[in-house]
């Protein structure tokens, strides 16, 4: 319905984004109109699908230049070596990982990335220690992590300054943290609490946030981990994008669309993903412009979503 021309009407409203208009002349009108303009709030919007639907995938990059690699298709349960590049609207297949695996970690950009550890179903059927480096064209093996191979852990940073932490192997729940300097891994101070199926994000090896695998959150300052405020909803196998002062975290197992935003001191609930998912991947670069792609539940999904904060939700004139 459109508005009715009138004068001498009543009105109410706190600001220029939401108002009421009621009554007025000509004649005596009973109509009440509600006006809402665009409201700035974090929102998810649909992006282009991955070429290969899969869960337990890793990612890095930005919302307009993302990279997805590894993962697992199911059924049948088969590890993927596929690598895809996102340009802000579509994914393009590029050269594969040297070793197919799932539940691995990622760091870096679409032109310089790290694929870290993960679970190799065949032929080893175990977590592997190997790390691969992406140069924008090909993957090559580089220095292995120091500890045992792990899966479902937190990671992030750049191809020359990265961090990995937590996760699990066949024998342990890990608190181990390792720092990458572009050439080799160094063991640094552990998480305060061992945690499996955790997630995390980092801008480099001096700034990181660990979350999930429950509700706990820890912040890394380059030397030590500090326990900070819990997630509102504890869950495993989440994904996130940002730093230890500003992170958006989403998804989780069992498959959920829940999204939370970290401001450096507390988590707040946000607008949900459009597609509930677990074991998903993120661009891992920013809390204001992020990318979510792939994930479960089985048989794996191809859906990609773009997070913008602030985004805009527009409400029109209603009667």
Image (cartoon, grey):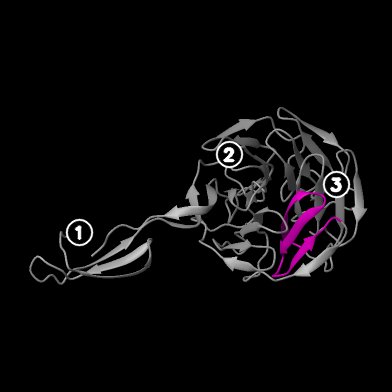
**Does the stretch in magenta take in 207?**
yes
Judged left or right of residue 261, residue 18 is left
Q: Which of these two is toward me, 101 or 289?
A: 289
Residue 163, position as x, y percentages in the image: 81, 50
Relative to 90, say whether 166 is above or below. Answer: below
Q: Residue at x 68, y 30 (%)?
A: 95
Q: Residue furthest left?
A: 27
What are the residue bounds of the magenta stretch? 196-222
* Residue 262 seen anywhere in this rendered image of the structure: yes
**Does the stretch in magenta take in 44?**
no
Residue 156, position as x, y percentages in the image: 75, 49
Any mark on residue 64, and which?
2
Q: Residue furthest top?
A: 137
Q: Residue at x 92, y 49 (%)?
A: 186
- SS under mark 1: loop
| First of labels 1, 2 by sequence position | 1
């Amino acid at each position: 319905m459109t508005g009715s021309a009138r004068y001498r009407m009543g009105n109410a409203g706190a600001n220029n984004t939401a108002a009421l208009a009621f009554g007025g002349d000509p004649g005596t009108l009973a109509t009440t109109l509600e006006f809402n303009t665009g409201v700035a709030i974090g929102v998810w919007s649909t992006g282009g699908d991955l070429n290969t639907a899969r869960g337990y995938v890793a990612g890095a990059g930005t919302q307009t230049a993302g990279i997805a690699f590894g993962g697992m298709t199911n059924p049948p349960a088969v590890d993927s070596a596929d690598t895809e590049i996102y340009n802000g609207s579509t994914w393009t297949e590029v050269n594969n990982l040297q070793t197919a695996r799932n539940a691995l970690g990622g760091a870096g950009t679409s032109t310089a990335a790290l694929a870290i550890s993960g679970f190799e179903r065949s032929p080893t059927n175990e977590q592997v220690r190997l790390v691969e480096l992406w140069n924008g064209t090909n993957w090559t093996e580089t220095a292995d992590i120091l500890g045992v191979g792990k899966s479902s852990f937190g990671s992030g940073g750049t191809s020359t300054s990265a961090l990995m932490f937590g996760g699990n192997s066949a024998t342990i729940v890990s608190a181990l943290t390792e720092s990458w300097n572009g050439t080799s891994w160094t063991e640094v101070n552990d998480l305060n609490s061992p945690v499996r199926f955790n997630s995390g994000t980092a801008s480099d090896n001096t700034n990181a946030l660990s979350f999930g695998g429950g509700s706990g959150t820890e912040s890394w300052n380059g030397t030590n981990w500090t326990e900070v405020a819990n997630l509102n909803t504890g869950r495993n196998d989440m994904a996130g994008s940002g730093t230890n002062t500003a992170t958006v975290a989403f998804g989780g197992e069992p498959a959920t669309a829940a999204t939370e935003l970290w401001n450096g001191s507390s988590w707040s609930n946000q607008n949900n993903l459009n597609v509930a998912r677990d074991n998903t991947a993120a661009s891992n670069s920013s809390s204001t412009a992020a990318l979510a792609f792939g994930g479960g539940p089985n048989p794996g999904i191809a859906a990609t979503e773009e997070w913008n904060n602030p985004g805009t939700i527009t409400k029109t004139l209603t009667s």
